[in-house]
Amino acid sequence: MSAESKTDEGGDYRLQGGPWASAWKLAAGAGVLGLGGWAAGHSSNPQRAAYSYLFAFLVFLTIGLGSLFFVLVQYLTSARWSVTVRRTAEFFMVGLLVFAPLFVPVVLGMEHLYPWTHVSAEHGGGHESAPHEGGHGEHGAPAAATEHGGGHGAGVYSQEDIERAVHHELLQHKAPYLNRNFWFLRALIYFAAWGLLAWSFYRNSTAQDGSRAEGLTVRSARLAPPATFVFGLTLTFAGVDWIMGLDPTWFSTIFGVQLFSGSVVAAMAVLILTTLSLRANGPLTRAVTVEHYHDLGKLLFGFNCFWAYISFSQFFLIWYAGIPEETTYFHARWGDGPWKNVSLLICLGHFALPFVFLMSRNIKRRLSLLSLGAAGMLVMHVVECYWAVLPNFARNVLELTPQDPASLQPHWLDLACLVGVGGVYLAVVFQRMTRHPLVPIGDPRLSRSLRFENF
């Protein structure tokens, strides 16, 4: 009996052999090889290994967080149409449990990643290059040149000296937040919150497969509102700590929302591509229909428009205000140089082309074209994560200006870390797929989802 016929007759929607049943083993093997590549690169080039790993960590963490948000929304709205696709999102959501151990390489490389770890001695580090004795002028520049003999006359500082002093003073002001102990405590809170939320919703859903208890749906629905607040706060602060912290003198009050919107776009793309593959291989042939993909396509299109709105808002407000501490982020990415080309690629590939392509109802209902659009969005998500992390390597480590052609240097460690982190994460996700039905068969709204039609 074929996998498809078993699914149709038995109604349990389980994997019955085939490539998906052993996919977790392939992913685990790839993860081991990738992390081995990271370890080899770390021994010879620890600075680049740290940035490459953070990039890969960000790519897959955002997919897991976006999947968690998708599950939360389904319970918040008591959605019926999405029941048959929710379990796939739950698998990617529960993979968040693996990111706590995967965070260890980020901790090992934090001194290469985060300049604030080298703040002055009174806050537990050293920032020897920044003058910190004597008075300061109106903008934090040194008022006297007592520390520099030779090349500078009394009371005369170079522009580099002034910038270092301002940078040092800003870090001093932020030291109560940017210090190791508090940073570690916040990271522990983030992983504990994500793990607890992911496991709670996953456990309720999978337990319902056998018990058919409607109370589990009610329990998840009641948990969803406070969970959404926790999700929003932890995602925002994690983005501030791990991504904005790469340039600790830069700030943006909208960065957390941008990270959130990109996470949801990536999760929707992964959900579409994964369910299409499972559908083509049998288990979801009858459960996920064109009607479901039409709505998934709407969500992909809508959240991508939201991402574009938030991204432009951040850029426009910073450009309009022209505050030096705010413009550094875009100066490194929009100044005349190789990173400007990446920025233009994101504008074109992450918004302009998908906006035109995914707008049509016909595209959303033609699965081959929808999969093409989703794949493109996933690729652009990877590019955006690279764009968010790697310019800081050129500036903080290589000390190159954005205009220097060498500031954009792809490295084999980028791919190794992507394979390593992705392999471990997907191994957990795919292994969970072999343990439970691919559809929440105990959900009381399943029958309505199976009969769902778009009008």
Image: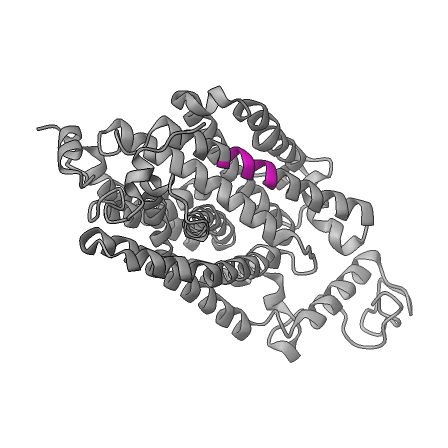
Eyeballing the image, is 312 above or below 239?
above
Q: Provide the major secondary structure of the magenta segment.
A: helix
Residue 100 visible in the snapshot: no
The residue at 58%/42% (across/down) is: 387
Q: Using residue 10 as the reference point, say whether residue 307 is left or right of it.
A: right
Give the quadrant of residue 253.
bottom right
Percent x, y for residue 181?
Answer: 52, 75
The residue at 73%/66% (across/down) is: 170
| 290 or 402, nearer to the observer | 290
The residue at 22%/30% (across/down) is: 282
Q: Using residue 451 as the reference point, say whether residue 240 is left or right of it.
A: right
The quadrant of the rendering that contains the C terminus is: top left
Eyeballing the image, is 124 above or below 268?
below
Residue 274 lies in magenta, yes or no?
no
Percent x, y for residue 286?
Answer: 26, 30
The color scheme shown is: one colour
Percent x, y for residue 233?
Answer: 55, 61
The quadrant of the rendering that contains the N terminus is: top left
Q: Using residue 251 as the reference point, say whether residue 304 is left or right of it.
A: left
| 368 or 404, nearer to the observer | 368
Residue 337 visible in the snapshot: yes
Region in magenta: 299-306
The residue at 58%/46% (across/down) is: 388
